Image: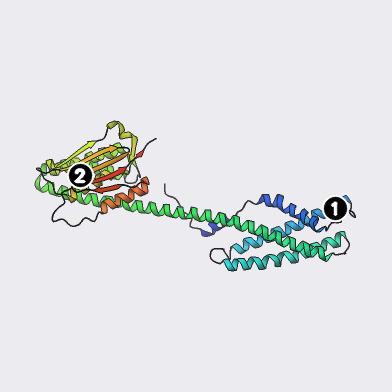
Amino acid sequence: MPIKLDNNPMKFVNNRERLNDIGVRVLLVPLFGISIPLLTQMVPHANFTNWQIKTSYLYTIMIAFVIYEGSRFLLFTLRHYFDWLNKPAKKLMAIIITIPFFCVPVSILLLVTWYHIFLHGSVNWQVIKLSCIIITGAVFFLVNVYETVFAVRDMAADKINREQLERAKAEAELEALKNQVDPHFIFNSLNTLSYLIETKPVKAKQFNDNLADVYRYILQNKARDLVLLKDEIYFLQDYFSLLKMRFEEAVMMNMDIPIELYDQYLIPPISLQVLVENAVKHNEFSDNAPLKIEVSLEDDILAVSNIVRKKAAGKPSSKIGLRNLSERYKLTADKLLTVKEEENKFLVYLPLLKID
């Protein structure tokens, strides 16, 4: 099934910005709100009532939430303008400048307000200075955590996006390769039919009927990535019957595949026909020296071989058909076919997909 890619880049960015940080808000922020005044000894427990102590810490937790939400907003805003990949220096400078410029003034304002509420304006500036340093350090710690999380998410999202693009590209390439089968096959078939009409008109009608059956198989299966080995073998036999009508005893094929294995394997469609057609196209043969094609199955690998008698006056082979078959095999079966050319024998090994 083709993968549909989303063409809206902003939607992709927005999906990246979504971050489930409820744990930070519920646990870590209140922890900072309580720990920082404890470290600075800002709340005089001995002089406060229980109600004043509780209210003081609720206030400092509120400070922590204000600092956290503001810093979080700044961090998310900066992500729309700078990123570590393309503008690392600017991103670093933006964080170093904006975070303290937000945290320090807001912290001072809220802490001074606490002193006015609970200690009637008796401000301890040493405590405020130390608190601002700790708050800023804590915010930079959280920023580092967020940026690390975002970096991991961005890498994962980019990997998924690249895989989607590669899959879409592969599917487009596969479709193009499938479409190349039809013109090549119909061209050779029409040449054969033309030859029979001129030389053997009685067989021309039978050839035309058989050609219709063969072409029906191509139309029915060209959109499929894989077909049963049984269907491909029957198609090859139909196709070879066309060759027999034209060349008679000059072509021979031996099929050495147990019939009980026909339903146990999958293969890219129109694979065997390409190899047989390739053998006919590039070799000399006659009734006295027929072209012999062997098809056998062993260890989940289908072997197709033929005796090599290269045409003396023929043009050098472009190997387009074989190359297209190899590409289709890679894209559909994720396997590599093997071509082996010996002194007088040409072999192609097709790894099959076994049905579990």
Question: Alpha-carbon distance for marks 2 and 1?
Answer: 93 Å
Q: Nearer the viewer, residue 30 or 337?
A: 337
149, above or below 235, in the image: below
* The label number, if any, that marks residue 306 in the structure image: 2
301, above or below 47, in the image: above
* Circle 1 residues within 10 Å: few <14, some 14–19, many ≥20: some
Marks 2/1 in contact by CB < 8 Å: the verdict is no
Residue 17 makes an appearance in the image: no
Identity of the residue furthest to the top in this view: 260
Identify the residue shown where x is 20% and y is 50%.
188
| SS state under label 2 | strand
325, above or below 93, in the image: above
Q: Which residue is mark 1?
A: 53
Residue 24 makes an appearance in the image: yes
The amino acid type found where label 2 is placed reads: Asn
Residue 183 locus on image (x, y percent): 25, 52
Q: Nearer the viewer, mark 2 or mark 1?
A: 2
Identity of the residue furthest to the front in this view: 343
Colour setup of the view: rainbow
299, above or below 322, in the image: above
Q: Quadrant of residue 62?
A: bottom right
Is 280 left, or right, of 18 in this rendering?
A: left
Residue 291 locus on image (x, y percent): 16, 44
Residue 147 locus on image (x, y percent): 61, 58
Identify the residue shown where x is 31% and y is 33%.
261
